[in-house]
């Protein structure tokens, strides 16, 4: 399977490139970076392939592309692709509501598998948390996240997904709009990913925790999603990890 990586010089993109090159069943078809990157024109892992601007993706012969870039770069690429049917796995987070709606519209032309967290098990973790919220909708949950000091203090994509999902699940059961879910952000070195959902029941507390030990977990999950998207998904449509990991 020939894979193009968008955001190939980023934290997860670098691991994606390493994982693809190390897997004899995969081929790195494109390593795409920002037009301002100093890597442009340099060989990838001393091979014949060189880093190129993302706009060059239109010339790449890819079976699938995996995007871990920025919302602006991701949307520019999607719009440039037009009606092309190249399957896309998207791990980029931080889209506005308008950008997210645009992605849904573009899934009429090609399959898009979009997730805030591709680590194996995260989708099941969210479903357990949502299920608990449905059982006790009157209990206000708190989402706690921890990340490295080098990351910005803004709420991460996975925590935003958890917070909004918990609010939606509680609202659907209670029949009126639940309050926004509180998100607590903490700093912690050497943490690739930490998400916790706490339900304070007064005399007791339920805590659900998901920990990612290495960034390779995101790369491995995204590659698995890409393999599913190429081999099993319909020709068009919007999908999530719940589809490729068969979680309901």
Image (cartoon, grey):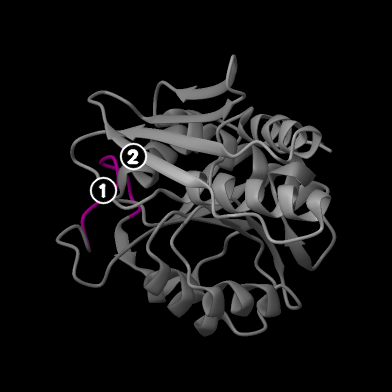
Mark 1 crowd level (few <14, some 14–19, many ≥20, 10 Å Cα): few
> Outermost residue, front direction?
203
What residue would you read off at disc 1?
153
Expressed as whole percent of the image width and height from the top left, the position of residue 115 reads 59, 50
Expressed as whole percent of the image width and height from the top left, the position of residue 84 reads 65, 78
Residue in the picture at 61% in, 29% down: 120
What residue would you read off at disc 2?
185
Mark 2 crowd level (few <14, some 14–19, many ≥20, 10 Å Cα): some
The vertical placement of 186 against 41, above or below, is above
**Nearest the eye: 6 or 146:** 146
How many callouts does the rendering have?
Answer: 2
Report whether 112 appears left or right of 71: right
Report whether 134 appears left or right of 7: right
Residue in the picture at 28% in, 40% down: 45
**Nearest the eye: 108 or 203:** 203
- Where disc 1 sits, the SS reads loop
- For the magenta stretch, what is the residue range? 41-49
Q: Main secondary structure of the magenta part?
A: loop
Report whether 162 appears left or right of 218: right
The vertical placement of 155 against 58, above or below, is above
Which of the 4 image quadrants contains residue 118? top right
Of the numbered discs 2 and 1, the one sitting upstream in the chain is 1
Query: Badges 2 and 1: C-beta atoms under 8 Å apart?
Result: yes
- Where disc 2 sits, the SS reads strand
Look at the image and say whether residue 225 sits in the magenta stretch. no
Which of the 4 image quadrants contains residue 238? bottom right
């Amino acid at each position: 399977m020939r894979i193009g990586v968008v955001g190939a010089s980023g934290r997860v993109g670098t691991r994606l490139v390493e994982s693809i090159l190390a897997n004899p069943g995969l081929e790195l078809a494109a390593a795409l970076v920002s037009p301002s990157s100093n890597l442009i024109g340099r060989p990838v892992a001393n091979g014949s392939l060189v880093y190129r601007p993302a706009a060059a993706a239109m010339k790449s012969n890819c079976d699938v592309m995996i995007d871990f870039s920025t919302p602006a770069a991701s949307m520019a690429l999607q719009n440039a692709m037009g009606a092309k049917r190249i399957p896309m796995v998207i791990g980029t987070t931080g889209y506005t509501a308008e950008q997210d709606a645009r992605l849904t519209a573009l899934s009429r032309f090609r399959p898009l598998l979009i997730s805030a967290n591709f680590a194996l098990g995260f989708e099941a973790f969210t479903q357990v948390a949502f299920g608990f919220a449905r059982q006790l909708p009157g209990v206000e949950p708190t989402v706690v996240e921890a990340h490295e000091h080098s990351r910005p203090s803004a709420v991460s994509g996975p925590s935003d997904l958890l917070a909004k999902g918990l609010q939606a699940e509680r609202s659907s059961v209670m029949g009126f709009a639940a309050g926004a879910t509180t998100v607590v952000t903490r700093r912690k070195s050497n943490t690739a990913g930490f998400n916790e959902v706490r339900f304070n029941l007064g005399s007791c507390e339920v805590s659900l925790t998901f920990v990612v030990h290495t960034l390779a977990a995101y790369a491995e999950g995204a590659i698995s999603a890409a393999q599913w998207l190429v081999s099993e998904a319909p020709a068009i449509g919007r999908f999530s990890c719940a589809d490729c990991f068969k979680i309901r």
